[in-house]
Amino acid sequence: MKARHAILVALAAAVTLTSVAAASPDATKQRVAISMKGLANGTFVLTPLQAGTLKRDSGTVSLVWSDEPAVMREGQNVQIYRNTYTLKGKRGSMSIRERNEWVDVSNENAPGFDFRPGVGIGRWKVVGGTGAYAKITGGGRSGHAGMGAEWLARQEGFLTPR
């Protein structure tokens, strides 16, 4: 009976250690949201959505983009953009690369601009960083709204400090 009990205890310990080892890479992931406002020279706020290493930060954001040929999906024109954001905050800087797709929400250009108001969705990933963002990896999805000078974006996903 004692031998059977010892085997069960050893088996339970092995399963526990295996579970902990398997869970440790995911345990370091931290869910975050990055809200941005403004076009090329705007502001950002990074907000942790769960406990972890990364803390709330804010600062300026700059944007470099390139547009790809538009595509037609079920009769709707879809503009495709590849963006690189540079976020400069109090805790360091982070570079994010994103691919997003925009659709128009109006037939007329935004007042004073040569484009129509629209909404977009995309995917993003971190491609570099300094300070608290050095060696950060991860990414997620994004949503955008552009109404002329008013432009908003929110990126949500998981970041892993290494």
Image (cartoon, rainbow, N blue to C red):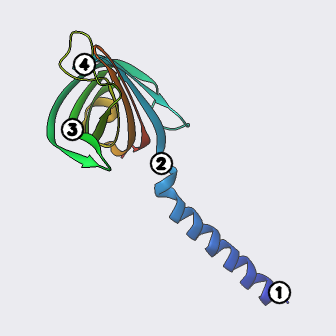
Residue depth check, mark 1 versus mark 4: number of the one nearer the observer: 4
Up-down: is 71 above or below 155? below
Residue 87, x across and y down, in percent: 28, 26
Q: CA distance from mark 3 to mark 2?
A: 31 Å
- Give the residue type at disc 1: Lys
Give the alpha-carbon distance from disc 3 to disc 1, as whole Å: 67 Å
Q: Secondary structure at mark 3?
A: strand
Along the polypeptide, which appears first: circle 4 or circle 3?
A: 3
Q: Identify the residue under disc 3.
A: 81
The residue carrying pointer 4 sits among few (fewer than 14), some (14 to 19) or many (20 or more) residues within 10 Å by Cα, namely some
Rendered location of residue 141, percent (x, y): 39, 42
Determine the residue positioned at 14% across, 42% down.
68
The residue tagged 2 is 28
The residue tagged 4 is 109
Q: Depth check: 58 or 150 in front? A: 150
Look at label 2 and name its amino acid: Thr
Disc 2 versus disc 4: distance between alpha carbons?
A: 45 Å
Tell which tag, 2 or 4, sits nearer the viewer. 4
